[in-house]
Structure formats: C-alpha cells, structure tokens
Image (cartoon, grey):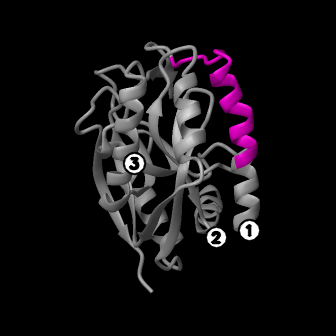
Amino acid sequence: MSIQKQADSYDRNWEKYSKIITEGKVTPLKEDITYLGKKFYGKDNPPFITALVPVSSKIWKVLQQIQADFERIDPRQHFFHPIYFHITLNELGREDQINLKEIYVKMREILSDINPFKLEIRGPNCFNYMIYAQVFDEEEILFIIDELMHKQLPFLKPRIRKKIPHISITEIKTNEARNLIETIEKKYREIEIGVIDVDEIQIVAARPYLTVGAFEVIERFSLVK
C-alpha cells in the first residue's frame, strides 16, 4: 500500500471516529472487561504475551509533549506511560496458554529474512475510545511480518481486515472528548513526529493493571542486514 493509500485510510478512520467522540457516543472500556477468558485488569492473571515494535525515546518524548497538552485540556482521560508506547504486531495469548519456546523458534524463522526498516510516525488520529499516533510503513514490512506470523503460528486468529498500525497514547474514559478532537484538528493532525529505525522485534509479557512495569521484555530478536 502506497503512502498516499495509507494516508487515505487514516483519513477515513479520522472522519468516522472523530465524529463519534465529538458527538458524545464513545463507549469507554469497562473496568471488568474480559480478555482471553479473564478480566483484563485482574491482578492474579498470568500476563498476556505480545510481539511488538518498541518505540525509541526520540519519538516518545514528542508523544509525551502532546499528551501533556491533552492533559491540560482534558485531565479526565487516561494518558499512557511512555513504557507502554509500542506498535503491536500480534497478541499471542496468555503465558499459561502458549508454548513460548516454540514461539521463539518460529519468530527467529519469520524474522530471519527481515532487514532493519523504517517507520514514519505522524500526528494523532483516533479509534472509538483511543487516540493514537499514525504509523506509516512505506515498504509494508509490518504487513509482511503479520502474514508470516499467521502462517507459522496457526493458533493466531485469522485477520478479517488489514490492521491499522498505531501507537496508542490516550484512552478516552468519558462519553466524549470534544476538546481533544478540536485540538488535534487545529494543532497536531498533520505534524511529522519522526522516524523509527526498527532493528529489533520484542516479545513482552503485558500486565495491564500496572502503569510502570506494565511491559516486561522477555525476548528480543535483532534484525540484521
């Protein structure tokens, strides 16, 4: 998908979801939401395991400045700690449901022919209850990795549609967040945040009930030329 087609896709996404947020039709996540058969925020749950692209400090510093502006405007929302910033490849399951050693072997195979690549990060967009930074992937490497993971890891659920790569920065906790949408439109929608040089893929254990330490890196895969 060309950069222009990716931009068109993000524009359609903005048109749909910014309207939902502005009109006060947000359905915030409930505290007792269930994920992978257990309460998402249950403190006794084993962590769920995720494959992701980490976000470099030069990017998250800019994202944090945007968050700080958002928080001054509307402190009711939840602003993710920079330790949380990432680009999800696939959520693999809970630690007690999967074979991590087998996943590590398969991921080494999947990534063996993937060279380091670049991702361009641009201004915020939104889903129904989430504000995120846009991720442009000119070479579609994220899509290639996703396809290979679904071939090599058959327990992953079939994907209905192409994912929208993103970095979540703010969760909407209220029925509307009109001021944030207006701020994004006026100040941030078209900005260029920076470029991530991706030379590593991580497997992390995620504990969403934590703020600091929500992600623990349990395996790293270096991309080499």
Residue that appears at 52% across and 76% down: 114
Of the 4 image quadrants, the one containing the C terminus is bottom left
Q: CA distance from mark 1 to mark 2?
A: 6 Å
Residue that appears at 29% across and 52% down: 217
Q: Earlier in the sequence, mark 2 or mark 3?
A: 3
Q: Which residues are magenta?
A: 11-29
Q: Quadrant of residue 127?
A: top right
Q: Earlier in the sequence, mark 1 or mark 2?
A: 1
Residue 122: assigned label: none
Cβ atoms under marks 1 and 2 closer than 8 Å: yes
Q: Nearer the viewer, residue 114 or 190?
A: 190
Q: Position of residue 16 (x, y in %)?
A: 74, 33
Kindly give the residue lying farthest to the front in the view shown: 186
Q: Is residue 137 left or right of residue 76?
A: right
Crowd rating for badge 2 (residues with CA inside 10 Å; few <14, some 14–19, many 20+): some
* Disc nearest the viewer among 2 and 3: 3
Cβ atoms under marks 1 and 3 closer than 8 Å: no
Residue 2: assigned label: 1
Residue 20 lies in the magenta stretch: yes
Q: Nearer the viewer, residue 104 or 63?
A: 63
Residue flagged by tag 1: what amino acid is it? Answer: Ser
Q: Which residue is mark 2?
A: 138
Q: Position of residue 170 (x, y in %)?
A: 45, 33
Q: Quadrant of residue 44?
A: top left
Residue 63: assigned label: 3
